[in-house]
Image (cartoon, helix red, strand yellow):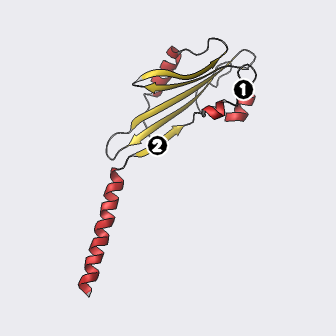
Amino acid sequence: MGSGRLTKGRGLIAGLALGVLLAACSPIMRYHGYAPSDEDLAQIQVGRDTRETVAQAIGQPGMGGVMEGSGWYYVQSDWRERGWRAPEEVDRQVVAISFDQGDRVSNIERFGLADGQVVALSRRVTDSGPRPSVMSQVLSALGQFTSLGG
C-alpha cells in the first residue's frame, strides 16, 4: 500500500517538473508604452480637435514631442522573451499627431517597423507633417533602448 502512494507521488512530482519545464520554454510577451488604436484615433478630427480635446480623448503621450509647438508621439514596443535569450522586439508602433499654429490637429500618422524599415501604416493629413525621415530618427533612437523587463 505504501509503494502505491510513493509511485503516485513520484508521478505527480514528474508531472509538475514537466509543466514547469514547458512553461519556462514558452515565450513571454512584454508590452512597453502606449499607442492609441485606430478606433481611438477615429474620435479625433483633423482640423477641428485641439491638444486639449486630444488629451481628453486618448491621453497625453508618455514621452517626447510634448514641447510647446511640437507634435505628440505615442510609442508602443512589443517584446518577446524566450528563456535565457535576449529579449527580441517583435513590433513597434509610433503614432504621430501634429498640430498647427492654432494648436489644432493637422496630421495623424501611424508608423511601424517591417523588415527593419520604417513604414507609414496609416495617415490622415491636411498638410505636409512629419516625414518618414523624421520618424526614422525617432524610431532609430528608440531602437537603441533595451527592455528592462516591465
Image location of residue 148, percent across then percent down: 44, 41
Image location of residue 111, percent across then percent down: 52, 24
Q: Is residue 141 visible?
A: no
Toward the viewer: 23 or 140?
23
Using residue 102 as the reference point, say whether residue 7 is left or right of it.
left
Toward the viewer: 37 or 51?
37
Question: Of helix, strand and loop, which one carries label 2?
Answer: strand
Which corner quadrant holds the N terminus?
bottom left
Q: Are marks 1 and 2 in contact (CB under 8 Å)?
A: no
Amino acid type of the residue tagged 2 in the rendering: Arg
Residue at 34%, 39% (x, y): give it: 86
Tell me which corner region of the image, top left, top right, bottom left or bottom right, holds residue 50.
top right
Q: Earlier in the sequence, mark 1 or mark 2?
A: 2
Image location of residue 57, percent across then percent down: 71, 34
73 lies above or below 132: below
What residue sits right under mark 2 in the picture?
Answer: 30
Amino acid type of the residue tagged 1 in the rendering: Arg
Q: Can residue 109 be seen in this view?
A: yes
Residue at 49%, 41% (x, y): give it: 31
Question: Of helix, strand and loop, which one carries label 1?
Answer: helix
Residue at the extreme left of the image, as rendered: 3
- CA gap between label 1 and label 2 equals 30 Å
Q: Residue 76 carries which label?
A: none
Bin the neighbour count of mark 1 within 10 Å (Cα to Cα): few under 14, some 14-19, many 20 and up: some
What residue sits right under mark 1 in the picture?
Answer: 51
